[in-house]
Structure formats: structure tokens, C-alpha cells
Amino acid sequence: MAAPKAPLLDSAGKKSKDLTLEASVFGAELKPHVVHETVRAELNADRAGTRAAKSRGLVRGGRAKPWRQKGTGRARAGTTRAPHWTGGGVAFAPTPRDFEVKVNRKARRSALRGVLSQHAADGTFGVLDGASFSEPSTRAAVELLANWGQELPVVVVTGDEQNVSKSFRNIDRVVVTTPDKLEVAALVWARSVLVTQDALERVQEKAS
């Protein structure tokens, strides 16, 4: 099997050469069930879980029985804070909860390798020469994406290249992130992935 390769692009989006990628990271097998579990865990981790409402025991007041048990002709009632009363509590009220789903570290790395390998195999993975951006330029970033010819949305992974991140961060349907914050969900969402040379090694370390 040939070693996976990716084009090295300059600030104009032109390919200068093909880079050989780490075969253990970009030549891995895609396991859909592992990717599904990892994406589900990442999306659940972003949920706040702070939704709440007051049950009948938490609503203020309602301690006294509104009327006597018998002889009034009305249905018996023990509190004015029952769910069917105006101003009462909520039946089966939601409470704050944690949506965390545990996924083993090996499974997360396997999912990351699988998605990266799929992008490399489909030709939607590119490497950017971050040094070619001498200053922030959104116009240059737009031209780069147009000349590269890949579909949006795009995930751009940068290291310490501030000029690159500032150039891409204001473009619609382009997400700029760093290797330590790179998630499988973002790679699944993206139609193409662009990684700077500085960040490529850290991405491969994270996935290996």
C-alpha cells in the first residue's frame, strides 16, 4: 500500500509538492461505530446540563391545606402548589444533570485516525505552509480556499501561527482550531481539512 500523501499549499493555494504523511495515522482503518461513539461523547460534553424547574416541594408556599377534607363539595386538596394548580410546581421537573459519556482513550484515538485517514484517502486533506502568511489577510485566505478547489465547510488546524488563524477565522463555514482542541465531530462535519506544517506533527502525536 502506497504511503498517504497530502499537497503542501502556499498562501495562494498552489501546491509546491506532496508531503508524505505518517502511515500509522493517515493510513488507518475507519471504524464507523467507534467514530459514532466518539462524536456522541464530544457533543454530550458540550451540553451544559443546567436545565431545571421547581417541583411541588421546591415552590414557595402551599404549606397549609387550602380547605378541609370533607363537606365542601370540592375535590380534596392538600396544597396549592400541586402541579395542576396555577402557581404550582412542575410534575417530573427536570433537574441539572451530567450528559458525559465515557469513551476509552484508545477508542478516541482510533476514531481520530480513521477520520483523518478518510480525508487523506479522499484527497480532502491539505497541509499549509504557515510561513507564507507574513501578515493576516482574509482575502488571501479566501483565494487560497478557492484555488485549492475543495468543498466547504473547512476545518483549519493551526499551531502558533497567529497570521493564519486571524486570516481564516472570519470566513463563513470555516472553523479554526488547534491540535489540542481538535475533535472528531469537527472532522466529520468538515468536507475538507487544512493543517499547517507546524500543527501537523502535533496532530499526528495526538492520534498515535
Image (cartoon, grey):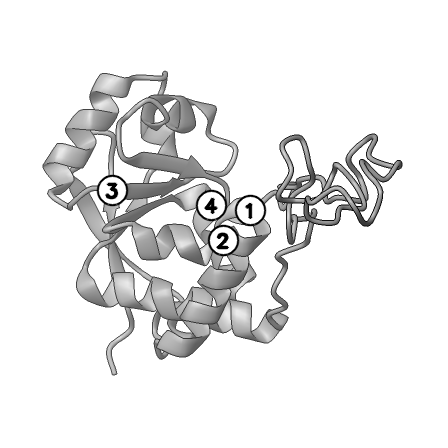
Image quadrant of residue 1? bottom left
Marks 1/2: CA distance? 5 Å
Q: Nearer the viewer, mark 4 or mark 2?
A: 2
Label of residue 43 in the image? 2
Q: Provide the residue designation for mark 4.
A: 199
Please report contact status of discs 3 and 1: CB closer than 8 Å, yes or no.
no
Residue 39, position in %: x, y? 45, 61
Image quadrant of residue 61? top right
Circle 4 — which element?
helix
Residue 208 seen anywhere in this rendered image of the structure: no
Circle 1 — which element?
loop
Circle 3 — which element?
loop
The amino acid beneath tag 1 is Asp
Marks 4/2: CA distance? 24 Å
| Depth check, front residue: 102 or 206 | 102
Name which residue lies at 33% across and 38% down.
Answer: 129
Marks 3/2: CA distance? 18 Å
Q: Provide the residue designation for mark 3.
A: 153
Marks 3/1: CA distance? 20 Å
Q: Earlier in the sequence, mark 1 or mark 4?
A: 1
Please report contact status of discs 1 and 2: CB closer than 8 Å, yes or no.
yes
| Depth check, front residue: 148 or 114 | 114
Q: Earlier in the sequence, mark 3 or mark 1?
A: 1
Q: In the current view of this chain or complex, which residue is farthest to the bottom?
A: 1
Q: Earlier in the sequence, mark 4 or mark 2?
A: 2
Q: Provide the residue designation for mark 1.
A: 46
